[in-house]
Image (tube, grey):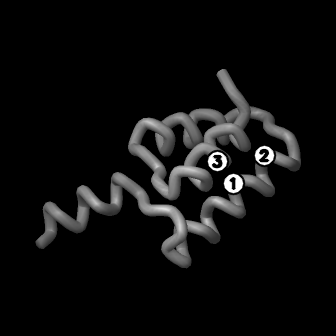
Amino acid sequence: MGLIREVVYQALNSGYLTIEAEDELRSMLRNKYELEDLEAFIQLQQAAMIGQVRQESREILTALQG
């Protein structure tokens, strides 16, 4: 299993967070992780909130609702 920050940086660089990456993050967050990983995860959350990173899961949910 990789590091949280690796998944985060991939999403930040691509501007897109896949469902698979979200699931991987959830799984990794259940275990011990380093401060750098937590900081990266917070950075991802902030990027998603301001629209710098799109989330596949939200796009699917929006499409199903609309």
Q: Quadrant of the N terminus?
A: top right
**Pointer 2 with pointer 3, Cβ within 8 A:** yes
The 10 Å Cα crowd at callout 2, few under 14, some 14 to 19, many 20 or more, is some
Which residue sits furthest right?
A: 35
Q: Quadrant of the C terminus?
A: bottom left
| Vertical relation: 21 (above or below) 44 | above
| Vertical relation: 56 (above or below) 18 | below
In the drawing, does residue 29 fall left or right of residue 55? right
Q: Looking at the image, is mark 3 or mark 1 nearer the viewer? A: 3
At x 64%, y 47%, the residue is 8
| Vertical relation: 50 (above or below) 53 | below
The answer for how far apart the CA atoms under marks 2 and 1 are is: 6 Å
At x 39%, y 43%, the residue is 19
At x 63%, y 59%, the residue is 44
31 or 47, nearer to the observer: 47
The 10 Å Cα crowd at callout 3, few under 14, some 14 to 19, many 20 or more, is many
Element under disc 2: helix
Residue 41 occupies quadrant:
bottom right
What residue sits right under mark 2 in the picture?
Answer: 37
19 or 30, nearer to the observer: 19
Residue 31 occupies quadrant:
top right
Element under disc 3: helix
Q: Looking at the image, is mark 2 or mark 3 nearer the viewer? A: 3
**Pointer 3 with pointer 1, Cβ within 8 A:** yes
Element under disc 1: helix
**Pointer 2 with pointer 1, Cβ within 8 A:** yes
In the drawing, does residue 64 fall left or right of residue 36? left
What residue sits right under mark 3 in the picture?
Answer: 8
The amino acid at mark 2 is Asp
Q: Name which of mark 3 and mark 1 comes first in the sequence.
A: 3
Q: Which mark is residue 41?
A: 1
